Image (cartoon, helix red, strand yellow):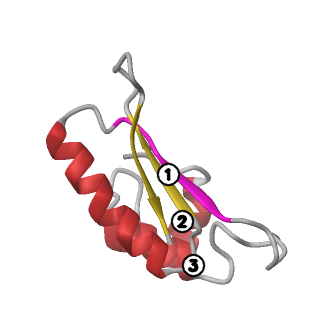
Amino acid sequence: MSVHRVEQTEKLFGLTVGQPVTQELIIQWVKHPAGCWKGIPPACRKVAVINQADSSELVTAARGLGKKLLACGVERVVITSYTSANPVKDVLLQ
C-alpha cells in the first residue's frame, strides 16, 4: 500500500519511508484531526474506495478494513479491483 503525502504521515505518526502501511495506520489516519478528513465540513458524505482488491483474499482483507472504516463514520466503502472486467467487488454501507 502507498500513502499520499508521506511527509505528513511521517510527522503525525513517527513513521519512516518504506514502513508498511497497516489497517491500524489507516484507521489512525482517518481518526486523527489532521488526517484524511482535515478541512472537510462535518455535513459532507464520507466515502472510501479501497482499490486493487484483485484476489478473493484481498477482497476479504478489504472488507475487514471497510468495516473498521464504517465504525469511524465513513458512510460507504467501495471495494474495487484494478484488473477485473467487473471492477466493483463489494459496497459496504453504514
Name the residue beneath numbered marker 3: 73
Where in the figure is residue 91, as x and y percent of width and height?
A: 44, 51
Q: Quadrant of residue 76?
A: bottom right
Q: Which residue is drawn at 36% across and 46% down?
A: 1
Mark 2 residue type: Thr
Q: Do the residues labelled 1 and 2 touch (CB within 8 Å)?
A: yes
Residue located at (36% from left, 35% from top): 52
Residue occupying the point 43% across, 40% down: 51
Secondary structure under tag 2 reads helix
The residue at the point 41 percent across, 53 percent down is 17
Give the amino acid at mark 3. Gly
Asked whether, in this view, residue 59 is left or right of residue 16, the answer is left
Q: Distance between the residues labelled 3 and 1?
A: 21 Å
Q: Is mark 3 on a helix, strand or loop?
A: loop
Horizontal and vertical percent position of residue 93: 49, 64
21 over 24 or under it: above or below = above
Give the Cα distance between marks 1 and 2: 8 Å
Is the residue under label 3 in contact with that under label 2 (CB below 8 Å)? no
Relative to residue 65, is residue 39 drawn left or right? right
Q: Residues within 10 Å of mark 3 (few under 14, many from 20)?
A: some
Badge nearest the viewer, 2 or 3: 3
Dot 2 corresponds to which residue? 9
Crowd band around label 1 with a 10 angstrom C-alpha radius: few (<14), some (14–19), many (20+)? few
Indicate whether residue 40 is drawn in magenta: no
Q: Mark 1 points at which residue?
A: 3
Of pointers 1 and 2, the one earlier in the residue sequence? 1
* Residue 5 pos. (x, y %): 61, 53
> SS of the residue at dot 1?
loop
**Which residue type does callout 1 highlight?**
Val
Name the residue nearer the viewer: 52 or 32: 52
